[in-house]
Each structure stands twice: as C-alpha cells, then as structure tokens.
Image: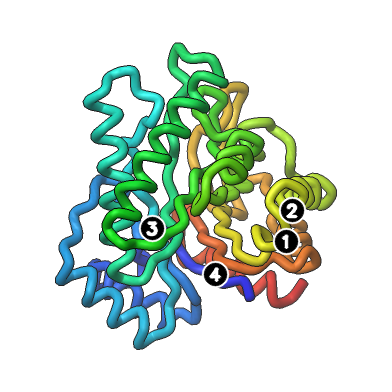
Amino acid sequence: MLLFGPAGVPHASKDRSTAGGVKTVAELGLDAMEVQFVRGVKMGRKKAEEVREVAEEFNVALSVHAPYYINLNAENQEKFQQSVKRLVDSALVGSIFGARNIVFHPGYYLRSSKERAYQNIKKGVEVALNKISQNGVDVILRPETTGKPTQFGELDELLRLSEELENVMPCIDFSHIHARYRRYNSYDEFWEILSHVEERLGREAIKYMHIHVSGIEYGLKGEKNHLNLEESDLKYVELLKVLKEFGVEGMLICESPNLEEDALLLKRTYAEV
C-alpha cells in the first residue's frame, strides 16, 4: 500500500500543534504526515507521546524531516558534531511517536571532492547510527535526493550509502531529481529511477519507499523553490502511473506549498490511474 500525506500540519488544521495536524490529516482522508523538525527538534517526550496516541487512534503513519541545519561534510568539527546531534535527536524524538523513517539533507560539497564529501558524510551517518543504536532505537535514516548540484544527494551517492550502511535507505524526491538535472520527468524516466533503485537495493527498497513530490521551479543551478503541482511542469500523473505499475509501497509525502490540497490530488489521481 502507498500512503499519502502532507509535509507538516495541514493548512486546514485550526489546532496548529503536531497532534492537531495528525487529527486533521485523518479528517481529510489522508493516511500519513511527515513531522517537520526543520527549524530544530523542539518537541519533548510528553508531547511526542501525545502525538503517538493520536496517530494510533486515527491510524496515521508518521515520519520525520530532520532540521535543515545539517551538514555532515562541515569543515568545522563543532558544526559536524552539531549536525550529528540534530540527526540523532530527530530519530530519538521521532521514535517516541512511532516514526521509523528519518529524512534529512546530508550536506554540501563545499570545497571537497565528491568522494571526500561522501566519506565525510558516511562517517557522520555512522556516528549518528551508533548513537541512535546505543539508545535502543530502531529507525531508518533517509538521506534525501537534493535539488541543487552544490548539495550532496545524487541518487547514486545515496544508493551507495544504503549499500554500505545498515538502516540507511534513500528518500526519493522526484521533484528534486527533476530540478537538479532538468530531466527525469516522463514515464520512461520515472521507471528508470525505480529500476535503478531496485537493481541496487532489491525489491525490499521498492516495497518500503519514502517519497517526496511537489511542483518545483528550477533553473541552470537546479531547484529554486517548490510550487503547487498545477503551477509546475512536473508530470505527476505519469509518475503516479509508474508508482502503481511498479508496485511501489510505503509513504508519499507532498511538499507543495498548498500541502494537503496537492496531497489529496495525488491520492485521488493515484486511485484513478
């Protein structure tokens, strides 16, 4: 089964808390929500337990997006350690409310070669995984395909990380891939992406995916900003056809500015294709 939901509390939610957002997601007829820790992990245990209770009551699946202020290729050791801590904190708090998928942007190349950045980021992920494991928590760290060539996050880099480290799987952001390369926006190209994931990571990766979709504006330097689907050139109907025909399961999170409107559009369209 493929679950659909927004990245964060729906706009329609009068209760702007995470628990309130989860309830609204269910009321809208959606199945999932990605809890946004993008400005920092500011949720305590008590709130996290409340969120879990509501999610279980309304049968809403949750994931986490870790803070944007993560760069595991940071040249400054203090920034590196802070990045690791933000990732670990996201996992520990997320696990309290039942989130097993922890999405994050791994970092920037900066002045490093791609290989050097890869090794630094791999080390950071390993450190984070060890700290998470020491706390008795079982999660999947999901480095995200990124939308700008300056950012670490090419699909092959993330597949390599997933091959070399346990409890690491990619978050496939189809909009970012489209913006980064200014292609990958057709039935055949979407199929190519999924085939590549399956070839490298096996069928299990297809049956347990975490996906981001939104409209997107882009230029020669990649992603500029997210758009609503109908305002963009993303061929989301073709994407949904491929997801269904390829047998993809897991969670599809909509990051369009209108959040739940496009999430509902995607869920309805998926049912119709």
Q: Which mark's residue is nearer the viewer, 2 or 3? A: 2
Q: Considering only order in the chain, which callout, 4 or 2, is on the residue closer to the N terminus?
A: 4
Q: Are marks 2 and 4 in contact (CB under 8 Å)?
A: no
Give me the C-alpha separation between circle 4 and circle 3.
Answer: 14 Å
Q: Residue at 57% across / 56% down in the picture?
A: 211
In this view of the protein, can residue 186 be seen by the observer? Answer: no
- Residue type marked 2: Glu
> Where's residue 40, x and y in %?
24, 47
Give me the C-alpha separation between circle 4 and circle 1.
Answer: 21 Å
Quadrant in which the N terminus appears: bottom right
* Local crowd size for mark 1, using a 10 Å CA cut-off: few (<14), some (14–19), many (≥20): some
Q: Are marks 1 and 3 in contact (CB under 8 Å)?
A: no
Q: Which mark's residue is nearer the viewer, 4 or 3? A: 3
Label 4 residue SS = strand
* Local crowd size for mark 2, using a 10 Å CA cut-off: few (<14), some (14–19), many (≥20): some
How many marks do you count on the picture? 4
Q: Which residue is mark 4?
A: 4
Q: Considering only order in the chain, which callout, 2 or 1, is on the residue closer to the N terminus?
A: 2
Q: Tell me if residue 74 comes above or below residue 48 in the rendering.
A: above
Q: Which residue is mark 3?
A: 64
Q: Considering only order in the chain, which callout, 3 or 2, is on the residue closer to the N terminus?
A: 3
Q: Tell me if residue 219 comes above or below residue 212 in the rendering.
A: above
Q: Return the mark for residue 198.
A: 2
> Where's residue 95, x and y in %?
33, 65
Give me the C-alpha separation between circle 1 and circle 2.
Answer: 5 Å
- Residue type marked 4: Phe
Q: Which mark's residue is nearer the viewer, 1 or 3? A: 1
Q: Tell me if residue 129 comes above or below residue 49 in the rendering.
A: above
In this view of the protein, can residue 226 be seen by the observer? Answer: yes
Q: Which residue is mark 1?
A: 203
What is the residue that sits farthest to the top in this orientation?
A: 111
